[in-house]
Amino acid sequence: MEPSAALLSETTAGLERLGVVHESWQVTAQEFVAAHAGRWDVVQSSFALQSLCEADKREVLSWICGHASRFVLVEFDVPEVDDVWDPVWFADCVARLERGLREYGADRDLVGVGFVLPVVLGKFSATSPPANHEVSIARWRELLGETGFGGIRVRRVADYWWRPAYAVEAIGSS
Ligand SMILES: C[S@@+](CC[C@H](N)C(=O)[O-])C[C@H]1O[C@@H](n2cnc3c(N)ncnc32)[C@H](O)[C@@H]1O
């Protein structure tokens, strides 16, 4: 399931090349859970559920818990602050962005305009709602517990320029 037509067709082309039998849906997670029942052995999501606001995160996580045996979530661990203009938080954010953009070489402008400005710097907009809703891994753990998951285990999987990424594994109720 992937809302972007371009990303979905790249993914399905890759699966076809590998001979993996699959189904695909060009929908958001919210649309998917509103329209589907059934039971799934494993549900996996990486860096996508951060796009959902708190209420939608709860709705989608509750659905996954009720329809899947296992859930594997991969997300960044983003410390939460009351004020994104807090000087310490802001200085750390700028340093990470500079380091990150240097990694992209020739693609730097594309990444800056297409990703850093709308997604990362969206936090600083006073006029438009943020494009993503990142939270700390501690908060993800709480949300998983509150939506019914058990057996929650966390491990660090990668150190990105933005924040470290963690895999959170949990047992659903289906
Ligand atoms: C940072 S990319 C991660 C892509 C890929 N999963 C990966 O790990 O490389 C964020 C992904 O979340 C998807 N996305 C955005 N809003 C979504 C939503 N409401 N439901 C499901 N996926 C969403 C985007 O289309 C994009 O594929």
Image (cartoon, grey):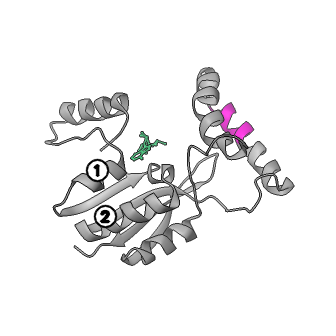
Magenta region: which residues? 97-103
Q: Nearer the viewer, mark 1 or mark 2?
A: 1
- Report ligand 1 position as a quadrant: top left
Q: Which residue is mark 1?
A: 32
* Label 1 CB sits under 8 Å from any ligand 1 atom: yes
Whichever of labels 1 and 2 marks the residue nearer the N terminus, that label is 1
Magenta stretch, main secondary structure, is helix
The image quarter containing residue 70 is bottom left
| Circle 2 crowding by C-alpha within 10 Å: few under 14, some 14–19, many from 20 | many
Q: Which residue is mark 2?
A: 64
- Quadrant assignment for the C terminus: bottom left
Which residue is drawn at the image coordinates 82% and 49% (left, top)? Answer: 91
List the single residue furthest toward the front.
Answer: 127
Which residue is drawn at the image coordinates 31% and 69% (left, top)? Answer: 65
Q: Position of residue 25 (x, y in %)?
A: 25, 41
Q: Position of residue 60 (x, y in %)?
A: 37, 60
Q: Position of residue 13 (x, y in %)?
A: 24, 29
Which residue is drawn at the image coordinates 31% and 65% (left, top)? Answer: 63
Magenta stretch containing residue 13, yes or no?
no
* Label 2 CB sits under 8 Å from any ligand 1 atom: no
| Circle 1 crowding by C-alpha within 10 Å: few under 14, some 14–19, many from 20 | some
In the picture shown, does residue 51 fall above or below 149?
above
List the single residue furthest toward the right.
Answer: 87
SS under mark 2: helix
Q: Is residue 79 left or right of residue 131?
A: right
